[in-house]
């Protein structure tokens, strides 16, 4: 059998994910740390050079583009139909940069002050390339974060935010909800 750029179903099973769905495509060039803490739904594609680390729950119909990193020490949840473009970084944890504590993973924990909170992407959220999402952010249903943006607070449902820090740009069309229903009627779940 010819090797493809994505892991086979049996190779994915052998990696030891907490849960793995059907029609999951993970690049052989992606890095997965602690797969026993990662759940993946159906119809998911994770491209080259992505990093998945920590407590991560990925729903169904998800695409995570190349060079994206999900650091889930305090948890990251991607509900169904989330899209994350290339070179996005999602942090659920943060070092203390005040100078009161040491930073980096090579320092004993008693000398650091790592804080964090779960990051949640509700259904149909989308993040454009080069963006950064900080701990505790919730991208509500249909929320969109524009390219090269930084989200440090929640993005309300069906809005488009962009900039550093991200600010509201406009509302987002909800037609994708109709398209989702059409897809389910034509193809099943």
Image (spheres, rainbow, N blue to C red):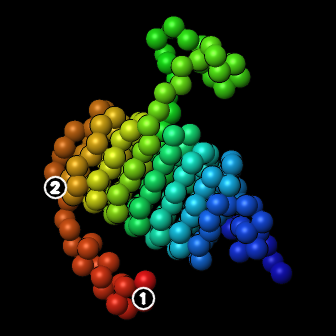
Q: CA distance from mark 1 to mark 2?
A: 30 Å
Give yes or no for contact between labels 1 and 2 (Cβ–Cβ under 8 Å). Answer: no
Outermost top residue? 100
Q: Secondary structure at mark 1?
A: loop
Image location (x, y in percent) of residue 107: 69, 18
Residue extending furthest toward the front: 110
In the rendered image of this protein, does residue 153 appear above or below residue 9? above
Corner quadrant of residue 10: bottom right
In the image, farthest residue toward the bottom? 186
Q: Is residue 4 visible?
A: no
* Residue 137 locus on image (x, y percent): 36, 41
Crowding around mark 2 (Cα neighbors within 10 Å: few <14, some 14 to 19, many 20+) is some
| x, y percent for residue 4 | 73, 72
Q: Give 65 or 120, whichever is nearer the viewer.
A: 120
Q: Please report the residue visible at 68 percent of the width from the left and 47 percent of the height from the top.
A: 33
Q: Earlier in the sequence, mark 1 or mark 2?
A: 2
Identify whether 116 is placed above or below 88: above
Please tell me which residue is depicted at 59% across the width and 77% down the height of the picture: 23
The kind of secondary structure element at disc 2 is strand
Residue at point 47% right, 32% down? 116
**Mark 1 against mark 2, which lies toward the viewer?**
1
What residue is pinned by disc 1?
A: 188
Which image quarter is the C terminus in? Answer: bottom left
The residue labelled by disc 2 is 171
Q: Is 138 situated left or right of 50 in this image?
A: left
In x, y percent, where is residue 82? 40, 61
Vertical position of residue 167 compared to residue 189: above or below: above
Front in this rendered view, residue 126 or 9: 9
């Amino acid at each position: 059998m010819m090797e493809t750029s994505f892991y086979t179903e049996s190779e994915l099973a052998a990696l030891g994910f907490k849960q793995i769905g059907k029609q999951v495509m993970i690049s052989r060039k992606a890095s997965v740390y602690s797969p026993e803490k990662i759940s993946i739904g159906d119809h998911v594609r994770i491209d080259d050079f992505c990093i998945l680390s920590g407590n991560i729950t990925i729903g169904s119909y998800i695409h995570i583009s190349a060079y994206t990193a999900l650091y889930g020490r305090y948890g990251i949840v991607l509900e169904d139909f989330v899209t994350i473009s290339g070179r996005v970084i999602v942090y659920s944890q943060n070092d203390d940069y005040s100078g009161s504590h040491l930073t980096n993973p090579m320092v004993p924990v008693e000398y650091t002050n790592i804080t964090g909170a779960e990051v949640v992407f509700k259904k149909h959220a989308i993040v454009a390339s080069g963006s950064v999402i900080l701990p505790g952010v919730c991208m509500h249903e249909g929320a969109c974060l524009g390219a090269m943006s930084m989200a440090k607070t929640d993005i309300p449902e069906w809005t488009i935010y962009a900039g550093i820090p991200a600010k509201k740009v406009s509302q987002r069309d909800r037609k994708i909800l109709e398209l989702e229903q059409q897809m389910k009627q034509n193809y099943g779940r």
